[in-house]
Amino acid sequence: MIRKPVVNGTFYPANKKDIDDLIESYTPTKSTKISAKGLILPHAGYIYSGKVATATVSHTLPKKRIIILGPNHKGIGNNFSLWNKGCWTIPYGKINIDEELAAAILANGDIIKSDNSAHIEEHSIEAELPILYYFFENFKFVPISCKYSSLNNYEYVANQIYKAIKNISDEILLIASSDLTHYEPDASARKKDREIIDSIINLDEKSMLQKIDKFNISMCGAAPVAILISCLKKIKATKSQVIMYQTSGDASGDYNSVVGYLGALIS
């Protein structure tokens, strides 16, 4: 099955040249490439979060096989929904689903289910693809849409993914798509986001979820990030570093109501 883009022309430009020009304008002049096991990337319109996502991916050595976990904003479909066959199209062309990896994930548990419906109009994974294509070009991927759930369920999901990838010789990059605090004054958003970032740096998904509840943090991708951290620790990730953080106010000049954007690299 072919998934057509739904946010081209809104979240990012509708044609290749304009995407190239925009990403090029966001790319740091110097970026040391790191072999990452995982990334955390924002997924808003590129005028707001594109600089953060671009800077982070530009520091990452390309991988040919990628799993992208994104939040389910629409509430459609299963709690953890995997698109397992075909391709997704973006203005650069088609990006194939890693059908072998998708089948392995589905075969190693029952909490992640094959379900395309959650992905049809969801932007959180699609928004990452043009930036990944710009830097990596040739890769296959597995998209998994995640609803907000419990730490236990996130651990089950992480374990299902881990069992599928642990014996694969190829390096696989895991990506969690998430924005942080939504629609608060800049100072408040930065204070709350600092709490989340501290937990991410410490690779502590449990404390991150506790802080979300304690401080009422409107982080849309808590599920993907918690699953990512849990899974990466199983494959011996030990270091998490912030590549870039900013709020939408840094792009718009409006600091009265902002969204926070984090780009992090885990190795």
Image: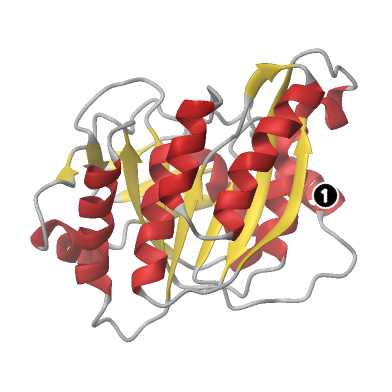
Asked whether 74 or 219 is in front, the reply is: 219
Task: Point out the image quarter for the N terminus.
Answer: top left
Asked whether 53 or 64 is in front, the reply is: 53
Side (left or right) of 71 relative to 44: left
The image shows a total of numbered marks equal to 1
Query: Three-letter amino acid code at disc 1?
Result: Tyr
Name which residue lies at 16% across and 61% down: 103
Q: Residues within 10 Å of mark 1 (few under 14, many from 20)?
A: some
The residue identified by callout 1 is: 26
Name which residue lies at 85% across and 23% down: 252
Q: Position of residue 180 (x, y in %)?
A: 60, 34
Residue 125 in sight from this viewpoint: no
**Figure colour scheme:** secondary structure
Asked whether 15 or 156 is in front, the reply is: 156
Side (left or right) of 36 relative to 150: right
Side (left or right) of 194 relative to 4: right
Q: Quadrant of residue 65?
A: bottom left
